[in-house]
Amino acid sequence: MTRISTYAANQSALMDLMRAQKQMFDAQQQLTTGKMATDLKGVGYQAESLSASRAAQERAKSYEEAAVRTEARLEAQNIALEQISEAVSDLRMAVTSKEGDYIMHQARQAFYEVTNSLNMKHAGSYLFGGTRSDAPPITISDLSDLIPMGTAAEAFENNDRKPVVQLDQNYTVEVGMLAEDVGGEVMAAFKRIADFNAGANGPFQSPLTAAQDAFLTGEIQNVITALDNVFVKVGQNGAKQAEVETLKNNHADRQDFLAQMIADIEDVDMAEAATRFQQAQTAVDVSAMTFSTLNQVSLLPFLR
């Protein structure tokens, strides 16, 4: 009977020691990692909420990164549009001039700046090419290249599909503009000026002839209309920039909110974990002493 009782006591003390060691190990792991557990099983019934929160956080991060890339594209697009507006403004000033040589010099310079801006690339893609990437939106390089064309529209090689980007689960933003939409009217003005200069009443000279003066007077409003169109595109691009910035900030805020939710579930209270570790360490010491004492129990002292 004594032998059976001693064995049972030993087993009970051993189980207490092992349980205390497990508690001390768990508390030590929490102190080391700062987390309640190293897997979803360790957070119990909150595992589903934790998994869903992590997935939502990753989606928000992905959309934020897409918004950052889109912001960079729109900024590059804004720079190109501003350059185009400056070039068209210079053309408007040129057509009000009475100096023939100056008019054509400024027209060629404005054409160069407009075409270069419409052919601008960002991250390897043409900003104003639509979804086409195999050819620049403008394939001509000189004002005189417009003369043999039937219409100025022949100068454009962009397709008619504007790039879009997904910035939320059910929300996409059209971020691209087409070269023909931006520069169609000013390119038509360039062609009219080039055609007239190469025609029967050209080239422009100083002082202007009556026919030349009449042509330029009529062309002023066309150039102003082209400039107004570019200003509208600048405004539309600015509105998209504000929209994308708002979406980016919303996704950043969402990540912060979800990070707090995740921390509430999986992060450990370090002070509480330290207390549990000390308690578990004490329990291990006590259990070890008890187990050691029971292992030394003998009937020899009672038989002497």
Image (cartoon, rainbow, N blue to C red):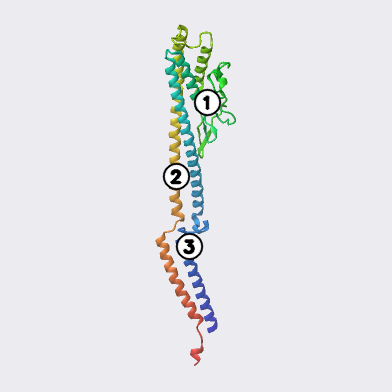
Which element carries disc 2, helix, strand or loop?
helix
- Mark 1 is on which residue type? Ala
**Between discs 2 and 3, the one toward the N terminus:** 3
Please provide percent x and percent y for residue 193.
50, 15
Read off the residue under disc 1.
179
Q: CA distance from mark 3 to mark 1?
A: 60 Å
- Res. 153 in view: yes
Q: Residue furthest bottom?
A: 304
- Labels 3 & 1 near each other (Cβ < 8 A): no
Please provide percent x and percent y for residue 16.
49, 72
Which element carries disc 1, helix, strand or loop?
helix
Which element carries disc 3, helix, strand or loop?
helix
Please provide percent x and percent y for residue 33.
47, 59
- 268 w.r.t. 227: above or below: below
**Between discs 3 and 1, the one toward the N terminus:** 3
- 149 w.r.t. 43: above or below: above
- Res. 1 in view: no
- Mark 2 is on which residue type? Arg
Q: CA distance from mark 2 to mark 3?
A: 30 Å
Front residue of this view, candidates 3 and 267: 267
Q: Residue furthest left?
A: 271
Q: How many marks?
A: 3
Q: Which mark is residue 127?
A: none
Read off the residue under disc 3.
29
Read off the residue under disc 2.
254
